[in-house]
Image: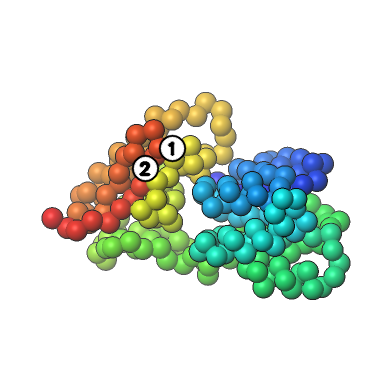
Amino acid sequence: MVQRVLLAEDDEVLRGQLIDLLTTRQFVVESFGDGAAALDFGLNQAFDLAVIDLGLPKLPGLDVVKALRSAGLDQPILILTARADWHDKVQGLEAGADDYLVKPFHIEELVARLGALSRRAGGALQTTLSLGPLSMDVKAKSVLVTGQALTLTAYEYGLLHLLLRRPGQIVSKSELSDHLYQEDLDRDSNVIEVFVGRLRRKLAAVTAELRIETHRGQGYRLIQQSAS
């Protein structure tokens, strides 16, 4: 599945290099030059990994990490710092970061670190997601409803995965599209509606407790309701 990276780096040159490299490695990159904008995105949009520089303007990177963790977000976070003092590294890790790199660094090393964090997140960090009778094993990429396997295509699974990570919250069509696709080119927004319709029918066939609501002009949300 395509992964969405939240990148917060105020150095325009380095930020551009990271965007170019990560994009060629099939990541979708959402980049920001200050901590306030990065935090606003992180609290309101879906992402899979974060790369956050500690020396950000408007809001320090350390505060961004703390705020993301305080909000209950458990996506892997890698911090960047130009500071050689070990206290800064310790503070970053204690704030909730999963790894760090000290500038200057080889960009290829950052990609390798992100790959390791991503693999770890696919297993230990988010082993199971559940809502009502539905349980998703993220590592095995399997879904059970009241103990029975639910057969989904890769795109249906990706759609359910994102909705299940944010139960009761509206997820925009653009967020779903970014999460499922690598490219913006020739992307038809109607395809998301098709996937939602298919997933909705599959869920309705096995349980009355879960429903995907359509909020016109806003997006979709997965909710649990009393079985009828």
**Number of dots carrying numbers:** 2
Horizontal and vertical percent position of residue 183: 57, 34
The residue lying furthest to the top in this view is 186
Q: Nearer the viewer, residue 226 or 207?
A: 226
Horizontal and vertical percent position of residue 177: 48, 38
Identify which amino acid the numbered label 2 is placed on. Answer: Tyr
The quadrant of the picture occupied by the C terminus is bottom left
Left or right, residue 150 beside residue 125:
left
Horizontal and vertical percent position of residue 156: 38, 46
Horizontal and vertical percent position of residue 165: 43, 56
Residue of label 2: 220
Q: Residue at x 65, y 58 (%)?
A: 64
The residue lying furthest to the left in this view is 228
Q: Residues within 10 Å of mark 2 (few under 14, many from 20)?
A: many
Question: Which circle's residue, 1 or 2, is located before the other in the chain?
Answer: 1
Left or right, residue 45 beside residue 60:
left
User: Does residue 175 lie above or below 76 as drawn?
Assistant: above
User: Does residue 78 lie above or below 187 as drawn?
Assistant: below
Asked if the residue at tag 2 contacts the one at tag 1, i.e. Cβ–Cβ closer than 8 Å, the answer is yes
Q: Nearer the viewer, residue 79 or 187?
A: 79
Q: Is residue 22 visible in this depiction of the protein? A: no
Q: Residue at x 65, y 49 (%)?
A: 36
Residue of label 1: 173
Label 2 secondary element:
strand
Q: Residues within 10 Å of mark 1 (few under 14, many from 20)?
A: some
Q: In the drawing, what numbered circle is on residue 208?
A: none
Identify which amino acid the numbered label 1 is placed on. Answer: Lys
Q: Nearer the viewer, residue 53 or 103?
A: 53
Q: Residue at x 53, y 70 (%)?
A: 124
Label 1 secondary element:
helix
